């Protein structure tokens, strides 16, 4: 600024000896100098603004790049988890398929000799009776053991799904009423029925789904029978309208421990000293084959609560 004014003064000083200054010319030159300074200031301010804008744009783009990289990493991690889960599920399905084939083969191989043992035991009992030997108690014990083995074979065949799946439209409540009527219940256990889906029609294989319902019901029975000191021994079977329709089985037993609950549907898992551990896993397999699902948890009175959900039959099938 100082040097610029000096230059303007030299330009305004005339060549006469007294050195007088032309003030008009000086003022014009000063105005021109300030105008130039103002233009430089505006240019500098504009350049700074452009730089700030460019820096802000670059910063925003950098943030977007970092965010995109984070999304890619998250998607990559999610894809890796999905791949691992899919591989685990495929491996589990292969294992279950192999287990199903093995159990079916084993069950068929055991059924014939078990029938031979049953017939032989009956013949021994008849011969002992003819000889006047009283071995009725021992024979009853053998017969109970044979029945238990036969039940294990039935469980294996049910889990293997050896029978064909033949669905048909069925009115749920009357069918479920018949299933419950066929179940053997000890005299000290109350079975409460709350069937409220009178108009619901489901497309089911009645024999296969009966197997699932019976296994869930028997599981509740065993919990009540094996637990001493219960104030009340009651099983409640309820249905509810909607799509899907629900079948809810609740008992007043001890319930399922929290650490056991995640494993109740695992094949061969059981907390009892006998049995195959295939009851609930078979029930879920059958229900899922019908397009439904099974959930198990704690009931309002502390016992187990099993919820079976089934889709309603299509309108055309229901009308048929």
Image: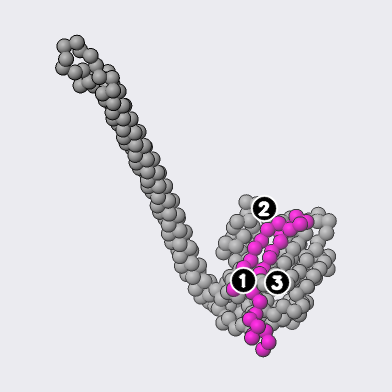
**Number of marks in the image?**
3
| Numbered tag placed on residue 257 in the rendering | 2
Give the quarter of the image for residue 148: bottom right
Give coordinates of residue 53: x percent, y percent.
Answer: 37, 40
Residue 78 shows up from this direction: yes
| Dot 3: element | loop
Left or right of 235, for residue 202? left
Sequence-earlier tag: 3 or 1: 3
Q: Specify the quadrant of the image occupied by residue 255.
A: bottom right
Image quarter in which the N terminus is found = top left
**Along the polypeptide, which appears first: circle 3 or circle 2?**
3
For the record, the magenta segment spans 291-320
- Badge number at residue 292: 1
Seen from the viewer's position, the closer of residues 111 and 296 is: 296
Front: mark 3 or 2: 3
Tell which tag, 2 or 1, sits nearer the viewer.
Answer: 1
Q: Classify 71 as above or below 20.
A: below
What number is the disc on residue 242?
Answer: 3
Q: Position of residue 226 (x, y in %)?
A: 74, 59
Q: Residue furthest top?
A: 18
Mark carried by residue 22: none
CA separation, marks 3 and 1?
Answer: 13 Å
Q: Say whether marks 3 and 2 touch (CB < 8 Å).
A: no
- State the quadrant of the C terminus: bottom right
Neighbourhood count class around disc 1 (C-alpha, 10 Å): few under 14, some 14–19, many 20 upward: some
| Label 2: few (<14), some (14–19) or many (≥20) C-alpha neighbours in 10 Å | few
**Chain-order first, disc 2 or disc 1:** 2
Q: Position of residue 257 (x, y in %)?
A: 67, 53
Look at the image and tell me whether residue 95 can be seen: no
């Amino acid at each position: 600024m100082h040097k610029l004014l000096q230059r303007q003064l030299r330009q305004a000083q005339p060549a006469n000896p007294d050195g007088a200054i032309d003030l008009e010319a000086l003022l014009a030159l000063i105005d021109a100098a300030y105008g130039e300074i103002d233009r430089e200031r505006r240019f500098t301010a504009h350049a700074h603004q452009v730089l700030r804008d460019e820096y802000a744009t670059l910063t925003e783009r950098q943030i977007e790049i970092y965010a995109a990289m984070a999304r890619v990493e998250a998607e990559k991690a999610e894809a890796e988890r999905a791949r691992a889960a899919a591989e685990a599920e495929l491996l589990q399905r292969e294992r279950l398929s192999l287990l199903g084939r093995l159990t079916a083969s084993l069950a068929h191989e055991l059924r014939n000799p078990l029938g031979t043992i049953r017939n032989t035991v009956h013949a021994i009992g008849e011969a002992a009776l003819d000889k006047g030997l009283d071995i009725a108690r021992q024979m009853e014990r053998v017969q109970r053991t044979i029945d238990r083995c036969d039940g294990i074979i039935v469980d294996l065949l049910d889990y293997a799904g050896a029978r064909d799946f033949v669905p048909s439209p069925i009115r749920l409540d009357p069918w479920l009423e018949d299933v419950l009527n066929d179940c053997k219940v000890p005299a000290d256990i109350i079975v409460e029925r709350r069937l409220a889906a009178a108009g619901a029609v489901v497309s089911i294989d009645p024999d296969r789904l009966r197997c699932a319902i019976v296994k869930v019901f028997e599981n509740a029975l065993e919990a009540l029978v094996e637990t001493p000191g219960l104030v009340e021994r009651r099983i409640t079977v309820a249905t509810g309208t909607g799509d899907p329709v629900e079948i809810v089985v609740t008992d007043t037993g001890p319930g399922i421990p929290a650490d056991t609950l995640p494993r109740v549907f695992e094949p061969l898992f059981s907390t009892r000293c006998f049995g195959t551990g295939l009851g609930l896993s078979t029930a879920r397999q059958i229900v899922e084959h019908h397009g439904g699902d099974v959930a198990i948890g704690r009931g309002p009175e502390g016992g187990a609560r099993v919820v079976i959900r089934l889709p309603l039959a299509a309108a055309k099938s229901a009308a048929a």
